[in-house]
Image (cartoon, rainbow, N blue to C red):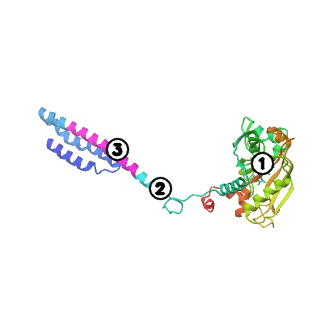
Amino acid sequence: MLQKLEELKKEFRESVEGLTDKNSLAKFKSDYLGKKGKLNDILKGMRSATTDVKKSVGAAANEFKQEIQESLVKQLAKIEIDEINSQLKKSWQDVTLTDDVQVKGLQASGYHPVTLIQREIEDIFISMGFDILDGPHIEDDFHNFEALNIPATHPARDMQDTFWFTDMAHLLRTHTSCIQVRGMEAHEPPFKFVGPGKVFRCEATDASHEMAFHQLEGMMVGKDISVANLIYFMKTLLSEIFRKDVNVRLRPGFFPFVEPGFELDIECLICGGTGCKVCKQSGWVELLPCGMVHPNVLRAGGIDPEQWNGFAFGLGLDRLVMMRYHIDDIRHLHSGDLRFVEQFKAY
Ligand code: FA5
């Protein structure tokens, strides 16, 4: 029996290190230690053995059992380490590689066209001395409506369908005009800034309307600012963005926070002004509402309207992207389809 035990030990030691996965390790364990396993098979002969043999074989068998258990634990740890290492090898990425290096299985990413145009506009305004401001997506009634001359009973609240929180005091901002209020609260005039960001409206989507889209707010407050200053900045912006002459028209527009208020429309670049689904067959796309800041708004922002005045505008960034890249449906922009986004890599 002792000799059989030695042979079994030799066989075990030779094969245990060849095990490379958890399933074969489990099977191997039951082959040796299971009820009908190889060790018990040898020990069956113990029943008819003498006490001395029982003693010596029993001790050797226990020792062997312990060796098997320890070896299996060690081998299991080795298998697990090998598994982790091979996973690491497969998913290893060199973060120093640039996107011109083709790596199998890796795709070079790019910027979303809205981000690209936002940065471009920020650069244009920075070069004209504007600051860049930010504001929260979750706003309160005061910053989104009240301070912008839209009291609770004002019918203009219905112009923008609002996602309200259940407390009915907070909301997802419906426009970036709240950044005007936050800008006035944080700065002493004179100042000029732009504030880009995401805005949310509870409205049905179509080729030119999304529920979550992007605007870029602009505000300039100083002494004796005029409509001529406003038009100058808007024209500079559009000629820099489109790098060509585009037809625009200015018409009166109503927004409670500006007086007078204007709608600056751009001739639809998708159809060249002949009419399509983006411009709703009108040939014009509403792009840039603007106007002279209402005295009530300055007052709510802590600024004396007797001493200071200014202009403000709210540019629709998604529609600007559509005009710039001739995209005929706004829903492509946030579809999450990589084939679409990958076309806009350069900045
Ligand atoms: C406003 O949101 C005003 N806060 C803009 C403003 C600022 C006026 C400062 C005067 C002074 P309006 O709701 O028109 O205005 O939206 C501004 C621009 O956002 C539109 O011209 C359009 O380009 C874009 N826009 C509006 N609704 C959507 C929508 N559902 N999907 C995509 N773009 C939209």
Which tag, 1 or 3, sits closer to the chain's start? Answer: 3
Reading the image, the residue beneath label 1 is 219
Which tag, 3 or 2, sits closer to the chain's start? Answer: 3
Quarter where residue 342 is shown: bottom right
Q: Residues within 10 Å of mark 1 (few under 14, many from 20)?
A: many
Distance CA(mark 3)–CA(mark 2): 28 Å
Q: Residue at x 71, y 57 (%)?
A: 330
Residue 94's mark? 2
Quadrant into which the C terminus falls? bottom right
- Left or right of 256? Residue 212 is left
Distance CA(mark 1)–CA(mark 3): 64 Å
Judge: label 1 CB < 8 Å from ligand 1. yes
Disc 1 marks a residue whose amino acid type is: Met
SS for callout 3: helix
Q: Is residue 80 magenta?
A: yes
Which tag, 1 or 2, sits closer to the chain's start? Answer: 2
Q: Is residue 149 visible?
A: no
Return the residue found at the far top: 51
Q: Residues within 10 Å of mark 3 (few under 14, many from 20)?
A: few
Q: Residue at x 76, y 60 (%)?
A: 238
- Left or right of 342? Residue 279 is right
Quarter where residue 275 is shown: bottom right
Image location of residue 34, percent across then percent down: 28, 41
Reading the image, the residue beneath label 3 is 77
